[in-house]
Amino acid sequence: EKASRLNIHTYRVLEKISALRAALNESESRLRGFALTGDIDTLEDARNAGKEAKEALVNLQDLTRDRPDQQTRLRDFSTDYSAWHRKYAQIDIPSLVVTRRIAAETRPRRGAMSGLRNQIDAIENTERALLVERGWQQENSQRSAAKFLLYASICAVTFTGAFIVLLGFQMHAADKANRSLSDSQNQLETVLEVAPIILYAVDHNETFTLMTGKGAPSIGLNSETVVGKKIDQVLGDAYDFEPLRAALEGRANVSRSQIRDIVFETNRIPIFDASGGVTGMIGVGLDVTDRVQAEDALRLSEARFRSVIESVQEVVFQIDGEGCWSFLNPAWRILLGHEVESSLGKPAIDFA
């Protein structure tokens, strides 16, 4: 029952994480629209979406107030997000005369979005790993409880027939525990069948004890061929084992790695025994290949845009809210004879 309450709470946290991600995506989408059109209403929509993201962040901080690890992650995210959000107010509308300047003005805001997404993913992966770990603990405790109840009942009947009623009661309790266990297993199996993730576990001997999830077959892994084998036997010497071994030493971590053509972002959490010793680790890997490809495409697109800006034979500039140059292309030096680096940060009126 306690585990079920905790799971419900975790699902509420995941719901707020989804709301935060949706608001951030909306902010970015609206900002891209503003970069292309210069429409002020679109910029205002982006700002409103940013406010919704901030509300979701506050809710997340409240829901995880008893979780120091998540509070730390959320504080870091809040700091980066606040800096990103404040830059909206710094967009100087009067200076955005042409689309090129709008794109140059908004590019840094959009570029910071990738880092914010990575932080959200780390927060979400931690919550999902907790669900998995809690499910295992619940499964083990409920199985142990069911076996104990049946064993105690059988012993009671052996000693005296007067305890037959107790046997029936105990079997009912065991059946209830098993039904609860079955519900938890069904929920976990649904997640593993639908989400592009890999769930695995490694013991203190660096041996796989679990391998499952929709993402596993995509890189040629499955329970039958992996469980019982050492990590280097399965993944090969070229794989970076440092993050995995760090988890086996008690240090939770998140990192990206590529296996074949698929990129996974993996959250690794150590498993401790009652005395505080590490008995193994749990890893939850999320397929982020599409996201990485989108980020690469965005960087390539921006590089091409910058190449065009730097090659045109007319001055392309950007002025900040203080009226100072914040961007100048090479034509500034070619046509007017001023060095770009020494001009940046100076009032534009000084060059009139």
Image: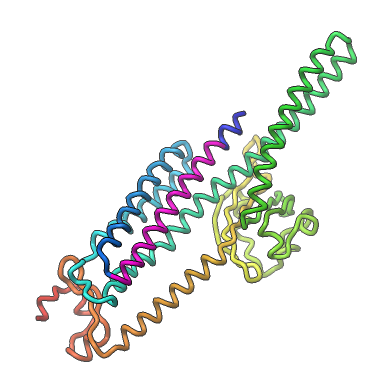
Query: Which SS does the magenta portion mostly show?
Result: helix
Q: Say which of 36 and 173 sits in front.
A: 36
Q: Residue furthest top?
A: 162
258 lies left or right of 99:
right
Pinpoint residue 179: horizontal percent, then vertical percent: 72, 32
Range of magenta residues:
8-37
In the displayed structure image, the side of residue 82 where residue 94 appears, left or right: left
Q: Quadrant of residue 224?
A: bottom right
Q: Residue at x 10, y 77 (%)?
A: 350
Q: In the rendered structure, does residue 156 fall within the stretch colored magenta? A: no
The C terminus is located in which quarter? bottom left
Q: Is residue 34 highlighted in magenta?
A: yes
Of residues 314 and 134, the one nearer the viewer is: 314
Q: Quick check: 276 above or below 42?
A: above
Q: Residue at x 76, y 58 (%)?
A: 226
Question: Image quarter for residue 116?
Answer: bottom left
Q: How many marks?
A: 0
Q: Is residue 151 above or below residue 186?
A: above
Q: Which residue is drawn at the image coordinates 36% and 55% (left, top)? A: 81
Q: Nearer the viewer, residue 126 or 339?
A: 126
Q: Percent position (x, y) of residue 176?
A: 72, 27
User: Please, is residue 281 above or below residue 350 in the view?
Assistant: above
**Residue 197: percent from the left, percent from the top?**
63, 56
Where residue 27 sits: x, y (%)? Answer: 36, 58
